[in-house]
Every structure is written in C-alpha cells, then in structure tokens.
C-alpha cells in the first residue's frame, strides 16, 4: 500500500513539472475586399442654374408732343396694339389754323422775293449804265437776299405747322399691351408731360439673373477665353417655370455686366428669348439653366467615394502595393453622378468606391475593379453607397 501511494505521488509530481504545450499563433485576417474604379479625365458639361426674373424688351410711355384737348381714344384700355396703330386724337383745329397761317406767310414771302428780284435786275441795269448810284444797287441786293431768307423761314414755319398737326394723331411706336389707365376724353393734355398710356413690348422678352463673385471665379477655371465664356453661339439658355414646366424655346445671352454690384456683390447677366405668344410676362420668376459650357479634362469622382474628415473632403486612393491612403481633395462642383474634383487626384488614380467603411488608412486592401462603372467610375447598379458623402460640397 505504501509503495502504491509513493508511485502516485511521484507521477503527479512529474506531470506538474512538465512544461505546458505551446499554442499555435492566430492567423492574420485577410485584407478587406473593396470596389475600386480608375479615374479618367474627360470634357464634362458644366450645368449652371440660377433664379431669374422676366422683364419686358421695352416699356414705352406715350406722351403727347403737342397740347390740346383729348378728342378720342381709339383702343380699349389694356388691349394689345400694333406698331403704327392710332391710339389718341387731339383736337386739331388750332393746329390746322396755324398751318393755314404759315402757308399764307410763305406765299407772301414768295411774292416779296419776286418783287425784290425784279427791282434788283432793274437797278443793276441802271448801275451798269452809270445812271443809278452804287448805294441803290447795294440796297437792291440786300432786299433780294432778305426776301430769299424769308422764304426759307416761312417754309420752316409751314413744316413745323404740318408736324404739329400730325402730332395731334398719336400712334403706337411698338407692338404690345397697353396699360389699364389712360386720361378720359375731354382732358386737357399738356405737351411732353401727360402720360397717355404705356405700351410694353413683350416680344422678345428679357430674363435677368445674377451670379456671385465666387461663382465667377469658378467659371474662370474653364479653359476658355474670358470674352467667349458666354458666347451666344455656343451657350444656350433654358427656362423652367415655377411649376416645373419648361419653356419650349431656347434663349441666348444678350448682355452681361462688367462690374460687380457693390450692394449685392453679384454680376448681372441678361438673356433674350423669343416670346411671340406672350407666355413670358414681365415680373415673372423663373429658373435659368445655362448649357454649352464645358470643363476641359475634368475628373469626376463618384459620390460614394467622397468622405468628410477634420481637414475636409477626402478619398481613399489605392497605391501600387494595394495600400489604401487617405487623400485630401478640393471639390469644384456637384453633378448628378458625382463631384468634379480640381485638386488631389489625376487621371489613372484608383479610388475606393464600394466598401469605404472597411478601409483603414495605411492598411492593405484587396481592390476589385467595378466593371459596371461608367465614365468617371459610378458604382455598379444595386451596390450600396458606402462611406460618408460630402455634405454641402456644392459651391
């Protein structure tokens, strides 16, 4: 019994003194799989949208050029009148009498001229025969010249009287709707003072809109001469109404200011649209979209690739050794399919689009090209937009 107890104790001691077996080291996890696209430079149309307001091509105040009693109004207030159409008639009798008086004075002046020329011929003949004195000849020449000048003066009076008589009939200088208020018949009209009506020419129509100084600096990045930036031959203007309807006809840039308004810090641009049907009304608010401005060699990054950090927007770029590096970028403008990036990336760079949340800066990843990506590398259809999108990236 004692021998058995000694043997058990000795075996237990030997087992306790035996070193523990070494455990196998855990295997490192495989690098995360991420979807990547290779960036390519392309000429990207640059959409520009602004808020605009319609204004008339011209608004003409109709004033009388002569005074008198308003005899008749030949149109309905608020109606559309055509250029050359008679609008008002002023009592012409005073001006008819003035024309008759001026015509009579012109006839009298012609008779005086005839007498002065006959007298001059007679005195000239006598002077050549040494019968008349030199002073008589000089007086005859002066009388003849004064009679000729009187003819010109009376003819001008006749022309003025005819014009004043014509001014009693007031015609529309342009085509367009008239204002709703005009003086009633019988009113004494004061020349160049009384506003009879206002005609607003609607065809064509102007649309005024503005952009900020910052937007102007961004447009200067477009590789195009400054004077050709809004070339009406290439840049077209579209209009959208408040209810979403699109105006069927395109416009063109008519004028842009060369200075900045110190009160608003904006630059005024004016576009012109055909408006034969009068669909565009002065004072109407619209959305203005410019097309035809192209950004050369632009890099478009899918929205899913953009993340935000303490230093701003960044993407994960894949190095040749498959290491993901965070790279700061400067966003130029937001598009429907991504962001235009003007700094931080170049054509040929590979960036992470799918699986951004699994990336750790400086770690190795398993890049998998997204074959379905188009153009600048949009994510494949049906794939989730991983990563944190750039908030407020649009300038």
Image (cartoon, rainbow, N blue to C red):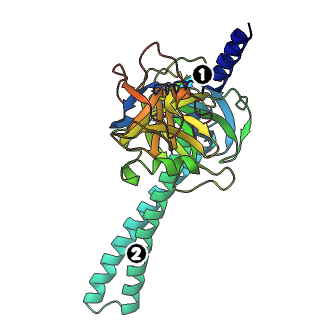
Query: 77 and 72: which one is in front?
Result: 77
Which quarter shows the N terminus?
top right
Above or below, 280 against 325 in this view is: above
139 over 66 or under it: above or below: below
Q: Which mark is residue 349?
A: none
Pointer 2: what residue?
145
Where disc 2 sits, the SS reads helix
Callout 1 crowding tier (Cα within 10 Å): few <14, some 14–19, many ≥20 = few
Q: Quadrant of residue 179?
A: top right
Tell me what residue is drawn at x 57 percent, y 49 percent: 214
Image quarter of the C terminus: top right
As measured in the structure, the alpha-carbon distance from the residue carrying label 2 to the one carrying label 1 is 55 Å
Extreme residue toward the left, this view: 129
Q: Where is residue 223 drawn, in percent x and y?
A: 36, 49
| Left or right: 8 in relation to 378 | right
Residue 265: x and y in percent read: 64, 52
* Residue farthest along the top direction in this orientation: 1
Residue 113 visible (yes or no): yes
The residue carrying mark 1 is 79
In front of the other: label 2 or label 1?
1
Q: Is residue 162 above or below residue 38?
A: below
Q: Nearer the viewer, residue 277 or 285?
A: 285
Considering every residue shown, the one lying at the far front of the view is 2
The answer to whether one can see residue 252 in this image is no
Of labels 2 and 1, earlier in sequence is 1
Q: Which residue shows up at 25% across the image and 88% down it?
A: 128
Q: Nearer the viewer, residue 242 or 55?
A: 242
């Amino acid at each position: 019994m004692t021998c058995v107890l000694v043997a058990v104790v000795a075996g237990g001691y030997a087992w306790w003194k035996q070193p523990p077996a070494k455990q196998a080291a855990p295997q490192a996890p495989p690098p995360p799989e991420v979807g990547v696209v290779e960036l390519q430079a392309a000429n990207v149309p640059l959409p520009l949208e602004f808020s605009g307001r319609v204004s008339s091509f011209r608004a003409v105040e109709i004033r009388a050029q002569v005074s008198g009693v308003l005899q008749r109004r030949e149109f309905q207030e608020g109606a559309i009148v055509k250029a050359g159409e008679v609008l008002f008639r002023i009592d012409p009798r005073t001006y008819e009498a003035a024309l008759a008086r001026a015509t009579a004075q012109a006839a009298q002046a012609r008779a005086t001229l005839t007498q002065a020329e006959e007298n001059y011929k007679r005195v000239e003949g006598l002077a050549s025969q040494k019968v008349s004195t030199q002073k008589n000849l000089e007086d005859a020449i002066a009388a003849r010249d004064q009679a000729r000048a009187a003819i010109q003066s009376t003819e001008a009076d006749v022309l003025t009287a005819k014009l004043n008589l014509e001014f009693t009939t007031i015609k529309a200088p342009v085509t367009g709707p008239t204002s709703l208020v005009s003086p009633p018949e019988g009113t004494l009209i004061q020349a160049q003072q009384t506003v009879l009506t206002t005609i607003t020419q609607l065809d064509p129509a102007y649309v005024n809109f503005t952009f900020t100084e910052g937007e102007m600096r961004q447009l200067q990045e477009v590789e195009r001469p400054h004077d050709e930036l809004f070339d009406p031959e290439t840049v077209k203007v579209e209009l959208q109404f408040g209810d979403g309807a699109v105006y069927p006809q395109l416009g063109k840039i008519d004028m842009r200011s060369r200075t900045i308004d110190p009160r608003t810090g904006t630059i005024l641009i004016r576009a012109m649209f055909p408006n034969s049907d009068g669909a565009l009304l002065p004072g109407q608010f619209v959305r203005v979209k410019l097309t035809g401005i192209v950004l050369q060699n632009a890099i478009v990054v899918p929205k899913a690739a953009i993340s935000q950090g303490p230093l701003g927007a960044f993407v994960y770029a894949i190095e040749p050794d498959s290491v993901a590096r965070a790279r700061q970028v400067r966003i130029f403008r937001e598009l429907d399919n991504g962001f235009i990036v003007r700094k931080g990336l170049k054509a040929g760079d590979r960036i992470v689009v799918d699986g951004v949340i699994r990336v750790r800066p400086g770690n190795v990843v398993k890049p998998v090209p997204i074959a379905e990506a188009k153009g600048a590398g949009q994510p494949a259809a049906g794939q989730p937009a991983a990563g944190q999108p750039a908030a407020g990236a649009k300038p």
